[in-house]
């Protein structure tokens, strides 16, 4: 997918202020049973097509509105992902602005997850 120049500029800016992780690191953490909140920020139709095991859905369009009800603890560890790691980076920056202190964006997104051959779930 070819992204617009200005969109990529704001993603690059967000990435300067957030922590990122890799697909392989997230898979290893899931396999080891580590506890963290895994949040899919893609659109509802994308979520319905398949998502990472154990993830919850809070689309980028509503995450700021709904995050406090879903994950009220500001110090909870949250790993966000989207299609490729761009929307999740933007969402991570906003959650940090809201006071969440342990927010991480998964670089590579679900595309990287699929390319690695890792399993998906469907609702």
Image (cartoon, rainbow, N blue to C red):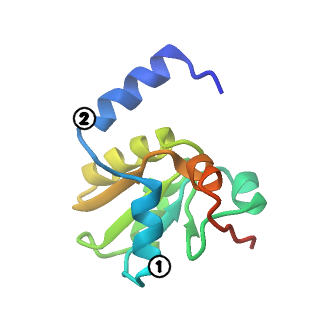
Q: Are marks 2 and 1 in contact (CB under 8 Å)?
A: no
x, y (%) of residue 11? Answer: 40, 31
Q: Under tag 2, what secondary structure? A: loop
Q: In the rendered structure, which disc, 2 or 1, sits on the residue that comes first in sequence?
A: 2
Q: CA distance from mark 2 to mark 1?
A: 29 Å
Q: Which mark is residue 31?
A: 1
Q: Is residue 100 visible?
A: no
Q: Under tag 1, what secondary structure? A: helix
Q: Nearer the viewer, residue 22 or 123?
A: 22
Q: Quadrant of residue 93?
A: top left
Q: Is residue 67 left or right of residue 76?
A: right
State the residue at coordinates (60%, 66%): 52
Callout 1 environment at 10 Å: few (<14), some (14 to 19), or many (20+)? few
x, y (%) of residue 74? Answer: 26, 69
x, y (%) of residue 89? Answer: 40, 43
Question: Comparing marks 2 and 1, which lies closer to the viewer?
Answer: 1
Q: Nearer the viewer, residue 102 or 95?
A: 102
Please determine whether, in this image, residue 18 is positioned above or below residue 33.
above
Q: Nearer the viewer, residue 93 or 20?
A: 20
Q: Is residue 74 visible?
A: yes
Q: Nearer the viewer, residue 54 or 111?
A: 111
x, y (%) of residue 5? Answer: 49, 15
Quarter of the figure that contains the N terminus: top right
Q: Quadrant of residue 117?
A: bottom right
State the residue at coordinates (32%, 35%): 14
State the residue at coordinates (39%, 26%): 10
Q: Is residue 70 left or right of residue 75?
A: right
Determine which residue is flagged by label 2: 16
Q: Which mark is residue 118?
A: none
């Amino acid at each position: 997918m070819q992204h617009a120049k200005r969109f990529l500029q704001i993603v690059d800016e967000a990435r300067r202020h957030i922590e990122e992780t890799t697909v392989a690191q997230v898979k290893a953490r899931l396999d080891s049973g580590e506890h963290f909140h895994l949040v899919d920020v893609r659109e509802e139709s994308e979520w319905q097509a398949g998502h990472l095991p154990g993830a919850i859905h809070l689309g980028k369009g509503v995450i700021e509105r709904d995050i406090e009800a879903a994950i009220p603890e500001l110090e909870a560890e949250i790993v966000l992902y989207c299609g490729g790691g761009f929307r999740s980076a933007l969402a991570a920056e906003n959650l940090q602005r809201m006071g969440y202190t342990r927010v991480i964006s998964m670089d590579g997104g679900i595309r990287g997850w699929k390319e690695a051959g890792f399993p998906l779930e469907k609702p």
